[in-house]
Image (tube, rainbow, N blue to C red):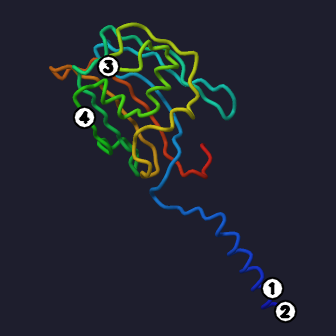
Amino acid sequence: MIMKVFVVIAFLSLSNSKSNFMPNLPLGEYRIVFEKFYSCESTNVFQNNLYFSKKSLSETELKGNYTYLLPLDDTYTFDLNVASWGSIGGWKPNSIVYIAKNACSSFKKVLGNVWYTIVKAFNVTSNNCPIQAGTYMTKGIDLKELDNLNMPKVYFYGKYKVTYKIRNEEKNVLGCIVLEITLIRPWEKPF
């Protein structure tokens, strides 16, 4: 009798585990949890005043404005550096490094479909490069619309600091933005 009970329990647990298989692997498909957004060192040619705003318990928006004192075109260099949070603390740079000429086109390529979402939300007159000098404002972009970046779809889970820089030919930083994110498993809940 006891043996039959163990067999039934084992069968039920095995059949249930197949439908809820959630491996604890160090990498895989992920969801992005946006943590912080801020400016870093630059000469303020490309300025931003962007922030996250909580609309409801499950909805966060990107709000604010950015100001370009010069047109953002392909004469600049686009510099992307992703730092990972170390197992003993501290940022470890160069998890991903992407440096490309043609800043506007390269940025558009990295953003993928998110480029069109941002251009529309900030009321930019054209969705092609260059972006003309001026101030662009948004009333809010749902962060869920920013998940579909043109980045690897499988990566290591953890906390990352993404630094975007725009440099001129003399390697001077004209604009700089830092985005802190956490990559979590698809079934995990944000903290």
User: Element under label 3?
Assistant: strand
User: Element under label 1?
Assistant: helix
Discs 1, 3 touching: Cβ within 8 Å: no
Work out which quarter of the rendered image holds the C terminus and state it.
top right
User: Element under label 2?
Assistant: loop
Label 3 Cα crowd, 10 Å radius (few <14 / some 14-19 / many 20+): many
What x and y, as percent, mark residue 131?
36, 15
Discs 4, 1 touching: Cβ within 8 Å: no
Residue found at x 41% / y 52%: 87
Q: Is residue 41 above or below residue 145?
A: above
Q: Which residue is mark 3?
A: 175
Discs 3, 4 touching: Cβ within 8 Å: no
Of callouts 4 and 1, which one flags the residue occurring earlier in the amino acid sequence? 1
Of callouts 2 and 4, which one flags the residue occurring earlier in the amino acid sequence? 2
What x and y, as percent, mark residue 21?
61, 65
Q: Which residue is mark 4?
A: 99
Disc 1/disc 3 C-alpha distance (Å): 67 Å
Tell me the amino acid under the disc marked 4.
Ile
Residue found at x 39% / y 7%: 134
Disc 2/disc 1 C-alpha distance (Å): 7 Å
Tell me the amino acid under the disc marked 2.
Met
Determine the image quadrant of residue 111: top left
Q: Is residue 184 above or below residue 115?
A: below
Query: Which of the two residues, 21 or 108, is positioned nearer the viewer here?
Result: 108
Of callouts 1 and 3, which one flags the residue occurring earlier in the amino acid sequence? 1
Q: Which residue is mark 2?
A: 1
Q: Which residue is mark 1?
A: 5
Residue found at x 72% / y 80%: 11
Query: Which of the two residues, 88 or 60, is positioned nearer the viewer here?
Result: 60
